Amino acid sequence: MLVAAALTPLVIIGAQLVRLGTVEQSRYESMATDNLETDVRLAAPRGNILDRAGRIVATNQRTWTVTYSPYRQSNEAAADVLARLQSLLGESMRLTPDAILAQTPRSQRVTIARRMSQDAVLPLIERPTEFPGVRLQEDFRREYAYPTTMALVVGHMGKIPEGRTSDFPAPRYRPDDEVGRAGLESALEPDLAGEPGLERLTRDARGRLLDEPTLMRPSHAGKDIVLTLDGEIQTLAYTQLGSEVGSIVVMDVQNGDLLVMASTPTFDSANPGLQMIDGRPVGYVNKVARGQFPPASTFKLIGASAAIRAGISPDETVDCTGSFMLEGWRRPFWCNVRTGHGHMTLAGALKVSCNDYFYELGQRLGPELLRAEAERFGYGRSTGFLLSEASGNLPDVQVLTPGELTNFSIGQGRFLATPLQVVRAVAAIANGSYLPTPRVVLSKDGVPTEVAPGVAVDLPLGARPAILNGMRRAVNETGGTVYKAHIPRAWGVVGKSGTAENSSGGVDAWFAGFFPEEAPRWAFVVQIEGADGHGGEIAGPIGREIIRAILRSEGRITDGVEQPVASARVLPASDEE
Amino acid sequence: MDTSLQRLGRSFDNPAALLLLIVAVLLSLGLITLYSASGARAGLENIRVTARAENRAEEDYRFHHSSSYLQKQVMWAGLGLVAAIALSMIPLELLERHSRLIIGITFFVLLLVLVTPLGVESKGARRWMRLGPLTIQPSEFAKIGLVVFMAAHLAQKREEIRKLKSGFLPLLGIMFVFCVLIILERDLGTIMLMGTVVTAMWCLAQVKFRHLATIVLLALPVVAVLILKESYRINRVLAFLYPDKYALTIGLQLNQSLIAVGSGGILGPGFGFGLQKYHFLPESHTDFVFAIVCEELGLIGAIGIVVLFLAFIVQGLRISYLAPDYFSGLLAAGLTLIVGCAAFINFCVVLGMAPTKGLPLPLFSYGGSSIVASLCCIGLLVNIANVAMRARGSKEAF
């Protein structure tokens, strides 16, 4: 009896001991480890973005996130800590102390303030024991040196969008992280985002460290990105655009590097939600790549190439009467000068942008040849640009009825192109053989990005001199469409203007060209929407200032003295009629 | 001449020999565990330096070095040994004769704690008494007083014990007064313990089963009311019933205790290598010290200690059986159960098999009164064993 009575508690307690020590052992062991060890994320700074000259475009400011848990604290102690936090953080505190204390369970860590500057949280850094339950996490805030002028290329940061959380998996991302939401910040997210590290802290229940922190995984900063853009010239482009709606793009004719990619209206990268900047509504569309417009007379350059490919001599003349009658049409197609230009050669027609010449040309070539030439120059398809782009609209042959063909031959009608497509076509004329692929990222962490191969254009023999002749005269000769922009002849700029009536009553003004003629380096397009006047008059002077800035930055001209470029050439005698 | 080995062997005829051996082992393990649980931040001296630099103002640096708890406990244990030796030599008749005086003094002291400024309140309970530099917990000694009185009364009224009025009611009255005083000290655990011990003694003394059953049935609703009256008692029961649900709030202590026990595994990492004592387990050096034993010594060590306590009970009951008279037999049983039942209730609490009560583990938990009282019980048990041996003509006394 006695033995049985004594053994019963032994058996019961023994059984429980065995259960806890064997069956449940691993569970409790991991709970014990959880008790003691906390893994702390080490924030990794996002990669910097620099312009081609090494100027900072986007960088990171170190900030601190303050979190708090009243776990194992009495209500009075917690209220005291929170009151002191409130006096320290003031308005930045997201929740009231009461709301924090009402939170359940108590062990839940609450974010109290985010993006605090180091100065604001200095007492928390220096005297942590006065604020039990409070923890600081280092974080980074994105800062932009060109918040508006680079916004449409660089993009902006934002919360991880709902429904895309699986694209931003842990441990690299936390749900409340900011990620690139537009532009390069988004397109280069994998390169820019750092790899956060992990540090294991061993603490007792009061939060005192029992050992040196163990580095589980080091953090790696994101890659530094160098852009092909030049921050200063880009800024100048915005100054030049002023309150106009338009876009400016400058491309290296050899490798497709974009020196300028500006478009208005823009927004503020640092504050993407802002609706108005300087009293003007913001815009989020990079029109260089995504704006689609009739290329207007800039397309005559391609028409010229098609003519020479078809065997038409550049010296052959067309008599411009000021209007063009198409069979079966009661109303004439007008030339830009209704009194007529008289007899026009190809170069002359490009100089004054004679419509009659190209109406005639279009009818002689027919839709297939002209459309094929446009296709050859990259119209109607994407350029291979890193960021999102539109592919324009190259009308099908069936659509190109004689009437529509007439419009098409002067770059209007249903034909739409992006400024990026236009500048690329101009670059092909400049280099004489291929369409460069636009590039905006020069290098990642010092490793140059690959220059994508260009697309061969196969310019017909004799086309380039003939077209250049027209473009040179348009800029440099009296009566040329861009002559009034007063671009110094010594700069070697050649170009073509364009004017398209747009649906809203104004005109879309174009100025596309390249320079220097003898050693082409930069192709450019200036496009202004809804302007009042002729393309060359509006876009020309803007182009001139951009070109001036580029030449100045290259040291080819200095302030005040517009020196001739190294090998100023004597222009051939005018063959103006 | 006997060889010394033969003498040693014969000395174990006295049940007190094995009892003392068990107690010596338990006390040693108890002190080592206490050292580990309370302050042996073994090899982590730098932590305290860091901690001091960081938390200069923190309150628990009353104890400035790692062995301060141990030193106090050793001092109390020494005092307890002196008391035990004294009690092992006093004539037992003295206790029997003056049992009324003893219970009177016991009640008087308990009353002093409650109504005079000598009483000290701590953690919501008024159980302690300040005597100069010492703070003692009289209820620990009151247990012995009650058992002495019960044994004496049951022995004196042996013939009348089955009668209600002259036999059982006076016992009940004393028990009632004891319970009321202890309840006022908010010490339900001690009442549960003494209820068990006294009921066991009544059973041994063959109190009428009808009386016993009635009183147990009457006590149950009273206990229920006492639990429901105090929110912390309800919480303890809730935490016991649903340990996972309240793991971070009212069940924190129990949960951390289970973590300690469970993470020890079969063998445990060894003395000093437990983690739960780093403030994760509240009261790791007092009521929950057994959890630290389980964590550091593993399943084997824990079962070893349970077996040792069981052996203590068996040995104590053997002394009771061998006791020369009815009084000392009942006394031996009561004293054995004071220590033994307390230990087993403590095991159940630590292992999550009973709600938290606030009962220390005898010989292990930090606390002067507890260890002195436990050693007093052992001293009296040795006394009874010696008397029994003498009565049987053996010279082997302690």
Image: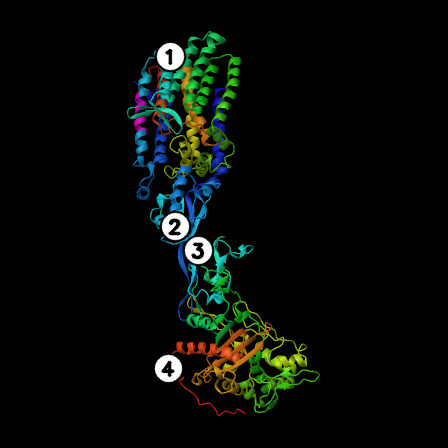
Identify residue for label 1: B99
Could you say whether the residue bearing mark 4 is in a helix, strand or loop? loop
Identify residue for label 3: A196
Identify residue for label 4: A561
Which tag is nearer the camera, tag 4 or tag 2? 4
How far apart marks 2 and 3 lie (CA) works out to 15 Å
Identify residue for label 2: A214
How far apart marks 1 and 2 lie (CA) works out to 64 Å
Please tell me in which quadrant of the rendered image residue A363 appears: bottom right
Which tag is nearer the camera, tag 2 or tag 3? 3
How far apart marks 4 and 3 lie (CA) works out to 53 Å
Instruction: Specify how the rendered protein is coloured.
Output: rainbow
How far apart marks 1 and 4 lie (CA) works out to 122 Å
Q: Which residues are magenta?
A: B73-82
Q: Is residue A305 magenta?
A: no
Q: Residue at coordinates 39% horizontally, 29% vertically from top-left? A: B123
How far apart marks 3 and 1 lie (CA) works out to 74 Å
Could you say whether the residue bearing mark 3 is in a helix, strand or loop? loop
Q: Are marks 3 and 1 on the same chain?
A: no
**Quick one: A423 or A332, which is closer to the camera?**
A332
Total of numbered circles in the picture? 4
Q: Amino acid at mark 3?
A: Pro
Q: In the rendered image, is residue A427 in sight?
A: no
